[in-house]
Image (cartoon, rainbow, N blue to C red):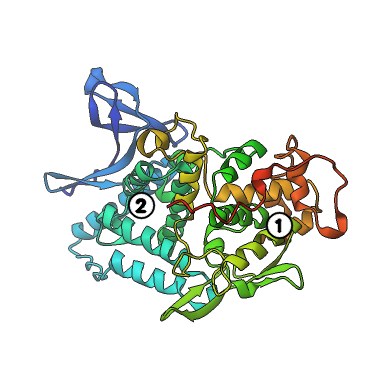
Amino acid sequence: MANETVTLLRYAKVQGFGWRRGKAIIGKTGKVAPDVMLLGKWKDKRKVYAPDGHFVLRYFDGRLPRYKKLGNDPSEALDELQTAKSKLRLKNSAKAVGYIIPSPVTVKLKPLAEYGREFLEQKRSPSLKLDEDTIKLYTVIVEEFVRVCGKAVPEDITETDVIRYCDGLDKRYSDGVRARRYTSLRGFLFYCGLEPKRLITPSVHKRLKSYEKKKVRIYSGVELTALLGVCDPYHHALFMVALLTGLRDDELAHLLWQQVDFEANVIRLAGYEIHHKEKTIKFELKDREARDIPLFPRLRDELLRLRALRPNAVFVLGTKNDLPNVKILYALKSKARKAGLNCGFCGGCAARKECHRFHVHYFRSSFASYALKRNDIRKVMEWMGHSDLETLARYIGAADNCPAWLANLYVLPDTASESDETMPSSLGFPELSKKPTK
């Protein structure tokens, strides 16, 4: 007689027993109870709580049991059970009258690696206007996930593969980086024809996408005074430009003198492609939106003195060979250590004497916080290159206790402040005889 048995089981980790299969519990209402199963035989059967697992269908091929893995959603598992029972009844009924149901045509599945190539090719489309850094990030995410999950086709990807990929990210990056890359990975999974909402359970999704949003960190007047006090003329100008423009580190490295308009008192920031030192140097802004940043009086003086030191340079803050400086972060950490500003407790201080409290991006958050003390929020939004006020709102109030001289650095000439508070001497341009630190 044909076997008409299809059973819904739960395969889960039971405390004290390890991974076990148990019968799923279907209540009187016909619904499957979540996160529980029946374990044991006959009178020894007992209901156990086992949330760490998933449902499976068990059917028989002759006397051999076969298992089909399902997700962790009770409603979807019940639908799969009813569908499997209907198919098996149809198959057995046809067999009873001597009719053989033809086997479905085998469909060749597209490899996961091919989906990855097509996804990245789509991201490179000119109409999407994604910058090179974004495309590189997508490339790293897709290639690393394909390698880590080790599956040939998207249909074989499971929630465990996604968790294993995120575990690898947690070992190397912060929670924020892991959360953002996980979000980008969901876009790739959707492109592969999968449904991330069904593949990844809500509780796991909530944990993978969440991270601690830290309070805005800005440099205090004491820190800036100490930091600039140990700088040679070049690094003094580097940090002052970062503080008074709010440029990102990549924008600082690629700032050209031809973008500095002393006559109009403005920096005209835009992307470009130039040929310099027998090299083609291409630079694109993060959002591909050019913007103007005013030359505050102290910033203007700093740039004029730096220009006098480097009259033939192409890059404002370039290296000795007049190329983009890609080691700004290293220079900042070195000067912070020399100024005695390291906290001495963080992992960076313990491993390399490079304090985690000092990052180039904190100059940008300092610019936003201090500039808001003396300027309209919409003006600061334009200078920062933000597209909405909500992004900038997190900086409001961050500099409430700052000294007046620090906020006055962001006053335009026609709105000069009348404060009598003196500015620390270290903010002035250092003596030219001071030798630059290696």
Q: Residue at x 52, y 62 (%)?
A: 250
In the rendered view, tell whether residue 165 sits above or below residue 253.
above
The amino acid sitting under disc 1 is Asp
Q: Is 121 or 42 nearer to us in this picture?
A: 121
Q: Residue 15's spot in the image, x, y percent?
A: 29, 23
Residue 315, above or below 353: below
Q: Amino acid at mark 2?
A: Thr
User: Residue reaching furthest left?
Assistant: 63
Secondary structure of the residue carrying tag 2 is helix
Residue 30 lies in what quarter of the image?
top left
Q: Residue furthest front?
A: 433
Q: Between tags 2 and 1, which lies in front?
A: 1
Give the residue drawn at x 87%, y 55%. Answer: 415
Say which label, 2 or 1, has the lower sequence index.
2
Instruction: Choose between 299 and 283: the one closer to the eye.
Output: 299
Q: Is residue 218 visible?
A: no
**Disc 1: which residue:** 388
Distance from Cα at disc 2 to Cα at disc 1:
49 Å
The spot of residue 87 in percent (x, y) is 30, 55
Residue that numbered label 2 is attached to: 83
Residue 360, given in percent of the width and then of the height, sits at 54, 50
